[in-house]
Image (tube, grey):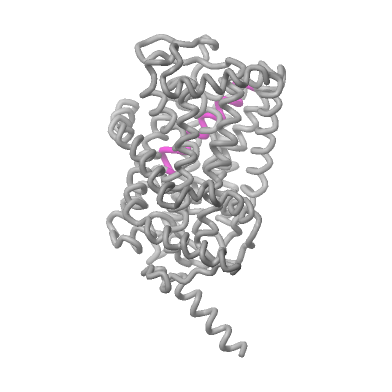
């Protein structure tokens, strides 16, 4: 199986996808006049506005669900992998894809809001919905939906559970089979409760764990403050092959930085839009800006925290593409969460292994919850003209099985399978948002004009010439009827 997965990765993760992700993010950033910088204050303000409804969740809950999908093992084990295979310079390229990717995250999330639907009393949306309604390619929408169910239900869960199992074994000696069984059982208890329960759990767990993790990283950086300028210089020089030790790794730095950056922040992959569509907002741009900020939370905050802890303590290896190691500070240590555990443990003895294992448990477990919700949304799309309860139950069992399987298998196979899932979705979704980005840009201009007039922005797709935004057309008509009746 490993050979098949490696073969697929070689095709999917060619240089074409790496540079496509960077190029598309740059293009969206330019045509939006770098909204990720201009509207950063608005992003933070919108985080705490809006409330949930019977049909939808609040902006913050939607953010929490999407961040729970983004902040996972990629932030702890993924950063270690990027450094080990791409050198310290890979961290810069993770930052680059996060900054540019915020533009892609905005576009896909706004499109999800514009073309969302109300199904079975809940808001549903995402790439499959906006591909069908916005482009009119039903076959392509079905391709994305099938690919997403496969990726979220089978390929990706193992990465999260494998890292949890490795972290708990390293810190507490817990048998990987016990961890796998426990994760599958607890996951089942939550996902059988649906999106409302998922959003409630994510709303509490994600901010708490992310803040605690960042506080610990700041403490470790402060303890080694004198080394910080050297580490920052190492990252930038390595990113552009100016550091002699890593001069021959420029291509690897870009490739692994972008690859692990996308795996972590998921900008352009098509996962964030599912949660974005579920939010109750008056204008799609509101949630688009919130989702763009979630990329910052993931990479610029949490991934950076991990990178600085690893590099500032020197607890990492860098493999030589030609064989052997360029840097080998952790002999006989496999690439993964053990790097981060070693970094924190070296700074705070007796604390690091356990803390990182617990952080990884919460980060990765909430990611598994998000995977389920994303897969469920695409099953809802595939079966929206019929009953899907039995198929959703099959998905739940499949996800629990994949979680257990990943926990007990090798980390190499788990990560390779995860990369297949991420790359497959990214290819399909990025092509779609390139074709369909104009409605998202019209919505941004409309939002900015209404804000400039001191208005609370309200979305009217027909006024903007956006077709097939049926949910919003019906919403406006219902509001007009309500006003007429009240008079």
Q: Position of residue 361 (x, y in %)?
A: 61, 34
Q: Farthest bottom residue?
A: 487
Q: Is residue 159 magenta?
A: yes
Tell me if residue 131 is in the magenta stretch.
no
x%, y% of residue 433?
36, 52
Decide which of 471, 304 is in the foreground and name it: 304
Q: Viewer-proximal residue, 243 or 184?
A: 243
The segment highlighted magenta reads 152-172
Identified at 33% across, 33% down, the residue is 13
**Where is the N terminus found, in terms of image quarters?**
top left
Residue at the spot 50% in from the left edge and 29% down from the top edge: 78
Residue under the image location 59 percent in, 54 percent down:
42
User: Is the magenta region chiefly helix, strand or loop?
Assistant: helix
Query: Which of the 4 image quadrants contains residue 366?
Result: top right
Front one among 231 and 486: 231
Q: Is residue 262 left or right of residue 172?
A: left
The percent position of residue 451, horizontal first and vertical second, equals 57, 64
- 282 lies above or below 70: below
Q: Is residue 434 above or below residue 180?
A: below
Q: Quadrant of residue 206?
A: top right
Q: Is residue 368 left or right of residue 213?
A: left
Instruction: Mark yes or no: residue 172 visible.
Output: no
């Amino acid at each position: 199986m490993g050979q098949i997965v490696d073969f697929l990765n070689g095709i999917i993760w060619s240089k074409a996808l790496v540079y496509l992700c960077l190029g598309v993010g740059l293009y969206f950033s330019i045509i939006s006049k770098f909204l990720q910088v201009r509207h950063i204050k608005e992003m933070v303000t919108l985080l705490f506005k809006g409330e949930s409804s019977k049909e939808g969740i609040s902006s913050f809950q939607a953010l929490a669900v999407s961040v729970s999908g983004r902040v996972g093992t990629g932030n702890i084990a993924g950063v270690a992998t990027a450094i080990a295979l791409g050198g310290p310079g890979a961290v810069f390229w993770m930052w680059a894809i996060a900054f540019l990717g915020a533009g892609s995250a905005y576009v896909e999330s706004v499109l999800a809001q514009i073309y969302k639907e109300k199904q079975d009393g809940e808001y549903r949306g995402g790439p499959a919905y906006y591909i069908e309604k916005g482009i009119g390619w039903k076959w392509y929408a079905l391709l994305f939906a099938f690919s997403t169910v496969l990726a979220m239900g089978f390929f990706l869960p193992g990465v999260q559970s494998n890292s949890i199992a490795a972290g708990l074994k390293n810190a507490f000696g817990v048998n990987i089979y016990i961890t796998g069984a426990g994760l599958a059982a607890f996951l089942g208890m939550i996902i059988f409760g649906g999106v409302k329960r998922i959003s409630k759990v994510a709303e509490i767990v994600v901010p708490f764990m992310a803040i605690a993790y960042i506080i610990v990283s700041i403490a470790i950086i402060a303890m080694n403050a004198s080394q910080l300028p050297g580490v920052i210089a190492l990252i930038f020089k390595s990113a552009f092959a100016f550091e002699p030790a890593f001069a021959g790794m420029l291509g690897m730095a870009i490739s692994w930085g972008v690859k692990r950056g996308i795996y972590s922040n998921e900008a352009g992959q098509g996962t964030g839009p599912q949660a974005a569509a579920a939010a109750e907002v008056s204008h799609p741009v509101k949630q688009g800006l919130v989702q763009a900020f979630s990329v910052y939370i993931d990479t610029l905050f949490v991934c950076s925290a991990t990178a600085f802890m690893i590099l500032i303590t020197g607890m990492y290896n860098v493999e030589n593409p030609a064989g052997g190691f360029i840097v080998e500070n952790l002999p006989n240590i496999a690439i993964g969460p053990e790097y981060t555990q070693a970094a924190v443990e070296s700074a705070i003895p007796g604390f690091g292994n356990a803390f990182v294992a617990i952080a990884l448990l919460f980060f990765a477990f909430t990611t598994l919850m998000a995977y389920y919700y994303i897969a469920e949304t695409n099953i809802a799309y595939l079966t929206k003209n019929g009953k899907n309860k039995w198929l959703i139950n099959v998905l739940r069992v499949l996800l629990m099985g994949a979680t257990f399987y990943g926990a007990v298998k090798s980390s190499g196979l788990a990560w390779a399978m995860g990369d297949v899932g991420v790359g497959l979705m990214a290819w399909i979704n990025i092509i779609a948002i390139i074709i369909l980005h104009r409605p998202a840009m019209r919505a941004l201009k409309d939002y900015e004009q209404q804000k400039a007039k001191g208005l609370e922005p309200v979305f009217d797709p027909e006024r903007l010439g956006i077709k097939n935004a049926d949910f919003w057309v019906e919403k406006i008509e219902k509001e007009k009827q309500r006003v007429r009746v009240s008079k």
